[in-house]
Amino acid sequence: MLTGKTIIVTGAASGIGAATARLVQAWGGRVIAVDRHQPADPVDAFFAADLSDRASIDALVAALPAGAHGLANIAGLPPTRPAAEVLRVNFVGLKHLTTRLVPNLADGAAIVNLASLAGLDWAEALPAVRASQDLAFEDVEAFCRDHGIAGARSYFFSKEALIAWTLRHRWTWRDRGIRMNAVSPGPVDTPILKDFVATLGARAEQDMAVMDRAGRPEDIAPVVGFLLSDASAWIRGANIPADGGLYAHVLDRRHRL
Ligand SMILES: NC(=O)c1ccc[n+]([C@@H]2O[C@H](COP(=O)([O-])OP(=O)(O)OC[C@H]3O[C@@H](n4cnc5c(N)ncnc54)[C@H](O)[C@@H]3O)[C@@H](O)[C@H]2O)c1
């Protein structure tokens, strides 16, 4: 499904990013891995970068080869980390990398953003979500203060803002055939799952109790791979849940179907 394509995968050293890198190679593509840490699995190229830092992202964009056919924005921080750092990596840095990289991507390239079930209620936070869309690195602390974004809320908000940003840019690069979509996993068994359970407490336990099992990185990677492939050419600005049915369950309960 990805033969001949070169895909940039951020967060490729762990969890869902590492599984995506393996899948891209299994589907015939080349992987350019980006992370703070060197991936343990073999990749075609690796670039170390701190995706919370504008200068590091700018240096990365200057170093990356031009002409990639896909960008999988998978690097992310859990809700146990400081709010501003979470917002920087999960949203502001992702936006910066993507918008800087687009001129260097091949025409027809696909961008996939790893959002989350945690971002499901983005429409309930519209003033902050609207205000965040052009948020710059230097304004993150003030933004968190002004919008009451602290603690675990930062993780939820980063994913709400990302889902909204993805759908807003459904056609931004349409003249070059470049499209962008999001994938929203439920709880997935990676090193950060314990952070979610620790931070979200009863809510995480309730979610886990109704599920037959937690997700695995290998449940999410094929959805990312499909969105990177030409098979999904008419899917644009979408947010696809991959969560063992949890989103459907939440909606069913909420609307008393
Ligand atoms: N695990 C889950 O339950 C779950 C659920 C929904 C969404 N997600 C999302 O999936 C994505 C991947 O998460 P995961 O579960 O595989 O986590 P993980 O911790 O296994 O992997 C995250 C990767 O991102 C990298 N990273 C973090 N900060 C970075 C930075 N500043 N610069 C460069 N690299 C950085 C880490 O080094 C790590 O390799 C995240 O965006 C996360 O929010 C995860």
Image: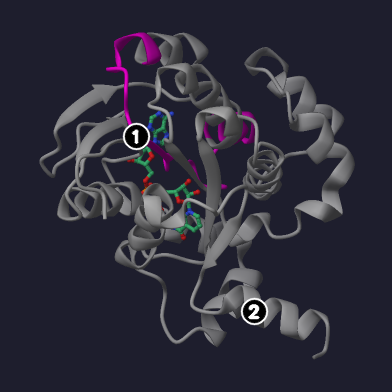
Q: Which residue is mark 1?
A: 69
Q: Is residue 49 above or below residue 192?
A: above
* Amino acid type, mark 2: Ala
Q: Which residue is mark 2?
A: 248
Q: Picture quarter containing residue 47?
A: top left
Percent position (x, y) of residue 54?
51, 13
Q: In this rendering, does residue 80 appear at all?
A: no
* Amino acid type, mark 1: His
Percent position (x, y) of residue 100?
50, 17
Mark 2, residues whose alpha carbon is within 10 Å: few (<14), some, or many (≥20)?
few
Image quarter hosting the N terminus: bottom left
Residue extending farthest to the left is: 42
User: Could you tell me if the residues under marks 1 and 2 are in contact, i.e. CB atoms within 8 Å?
Assistant: no
Give the residues drawn in magenta, as a range. 61-89
Please state which of the two labelled residues, at mark 1 or mark 2, is closer to the viewer: 1
Residue extending farthest to the bottom is: 257
Secondary structure found at label 1: loop
Percent position (x, y) of residue 86?
57, 36
* 30 left or right, relative to 59: left
**Viewer-proximal residue, 144 or 19?**
19
Q: Residue at x 20, y 51 (%)?
A: 22
Please tell me in which quarter of the rendered image ligand 1 is found: top left
Percent position (x, y) of residue 236?
59, 49
Q: Picture quarter containing residue 207?
A: bottom right
**Viewer-proximal residue, 43 or 210?**
43
Secondary structure found at label 2: helix
Q: Residue at x 17, y 49 (%)?
A: 28
- Residue 68: in magenta span: yes
Q: Is residue 11 above or below residue 257?
A: above
Mark 1, residues whose alpha carbon is within 10 Å: few (<14), some, or many (≥20)?
many
Residue extending farthest to the front is: 175
